[in-house]
Amino acid sequence: MLDCVELLVDLPENGLKKGMVGAVVALYGVDNSEIEYEIEFVNVQGKPTALLPIKADLLTLYVGSAFTVETNDEIEEIAQALEDLLVENL
């Protein structure tokens, strides 16, 4: 199982915001001050939105649900994604 991490800062050049959760897919570096993790971020449909190396000090281990829902539009988007998955797998 992949560890989930939470982003501690905004990375606007990559379309990422503080608090976003991603999965660690690789580890680079030997020295703690130089460690970077390859992190994959996905949308509610599970499609990758970003894959990039991020320095360890910009991340924290995440424990909890990877998705938080803040608006009715997000709830509708999640419901549609689940419906699409069910149709694809029938």
Image (tube, rainbow, N blue to C red):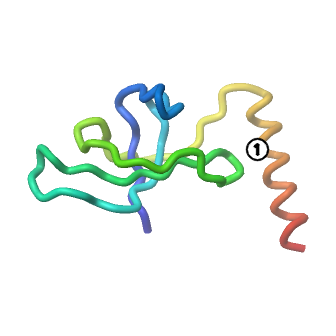
In the rendered view, tell whether residue 75 sits above or below residue 31: above
Q: Hey, which residue is sitting farthest front in the picture?
A: 13
Q: Position of residue 63 (x, y in %)?
A: 41, 48
Q: Hey, which residue is sitting farthest bottom in the picture?
A: 90
Q: Specify whether 71 is left or right of 30.
A: right
In the rendered view, tell whether residue 43 sits above or below residue 58: below
Q: Position of residue 87 (x, y in %)?
A: 90, 64
Q: How many marks?
A: 1
Q: Residue at x 48, y 28 (%)?
A: 17
Task: Say what amino acid the circle numbered 1 marks.
Answer: Ile
Nearer to the camera, 55 or 5? 55
Quadrant of res 23: bottom left
In the rendered view, tell whether residue 12 sits above or below residue 83: above
Q: Residue at x 47, y 42 (%)?
A: 21
Q: Residue at x 66, y 33 (%)?
A: 69
Q: Position of residue 90 (x, y in %)?
A: 90, 74
**Secondary structure category for the residue under label 1:** helix
How busy is the neighbourhood of tag 1: few (under 14 within 10 Å), some, or many (20 plus)?
A: some
Q: Residue at x 44, y 68 (%)?
A: 1
Q: Position of residue 56 (x, y in %)?
A: 25, 44
Q: Specify whether 81 is left or right of 43.
A: right
* Residue assigned mark 1: 78
Q: Specify whether 9 is left or right of 46.
A: left
